[in-house]
Image (spheres, rainbow, N blue to C red):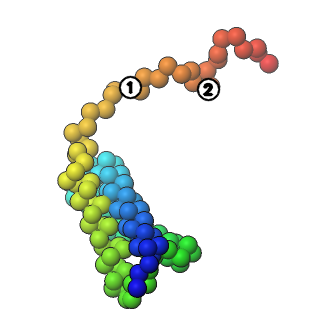
Amino acid sequence: MVTVVDALSLTFILLVHTAITATMTRFFRVRLSTRWGGFLYAVLLCPVVLVGTTLLFSGIFGLGPDLGSAAAVVGLVIALPLATGITFDYFWMPAPEDVDLPEKWEDDRPNRYERRPGRDDR
């Protein structure tokens, strides 16, 4: 029987994995200029990271219930967040080329390497 703590920890793992996948997918879409490159990198590299975080969360931290088989872990903890994160980035977020960015970052704070008026020369 699954306890409330097991259900909450599994939900936490699923949310973290979905966020990791969506962030990595967005990074690949922004950095790569090819049409399929971002998707292929997301499909090939995100599962590697998700396996590592699954081992970290369930092994070292002891989070999540016993799902019974390796196929259930791969399907629920890796494949489901992978599909959800990629879908979130591709269908809900605007395309990287549709986002308008300023030409120059306007910042009124002085650079820490610039000379500031009123400081002594040492």
Picture disc at residue 80: none
Instruction: From the viewer's side, name the closer residue of 39 and 11.
Output: 11
The residue identified by callout 1 is 104
The residue identified by callout 2 is 112
Give the spatial CA distance, label 2 vs label 1: 19 Å
Circle 2 residues within 10 Å: few <14, some 14–19, many ≥20 = few
Which quarter of the rendered picture does the N terminus lie within?
Answer: bottom left
Which quarter of the rendered picture does the C terminus lie within?
Answer: top right
Q: Is residue 122 left or right of residue 52?
A: right
Residue 106 is situated, as x and y percent measured from the top left of the image, at 42, 23
The residue that appears at 43% across and 73% down in the rendered structure is 4
The residue that appears at 27% across and 54% down in the rendered structure is 89
* Amino acid found under the numbered disc labelled 1: Lys
Confirm whether residue 11 shows in the render: yes
The residue that appears at 26% across and 33% down in the rendered structure is 100
Relative height, residue 85 to residue 67 (above, below):
above
Q: Is residue 8 left or right of residue 75?
A: right
Residue 10 is situated, as x and y percent measured from the top left of the image, at 41, 72
Q: Earlier in the sequence, mark 2 or mark 1?
A: 1
Residue 41 is situated, as x and y percent measured from the top left of the image, at 32, 62
Instruction: From the viewer's side, name the closer residue of 88 and 5.
Output: 5
Which element type, helix, strand or loop, lies under badge 2?
Answer: loop
Q: Could you say which quadrant of the image residue 99 lies in?
A: top left
Instruction: From the viewer's side, name the closer residue of 39 and 91.
Output: 91
The residue that appears at 19% across and 53% down in the rendered structure is 91
* Amino acid found under the numbered disc labelled 2: Arg
Residue 38 is situated, as x and y percent measured from the top left of the image, at 28, 57
Name the outermost residue toward the right: 122
Name the outermost residue toward the bottom: 68
Relative height, residue 63 to residue 41 (above, below):
below
Confirm whether residue 52 shows in the render: no
Which element type, helix, strand or loop, lies under badge 1?
Answer: loop
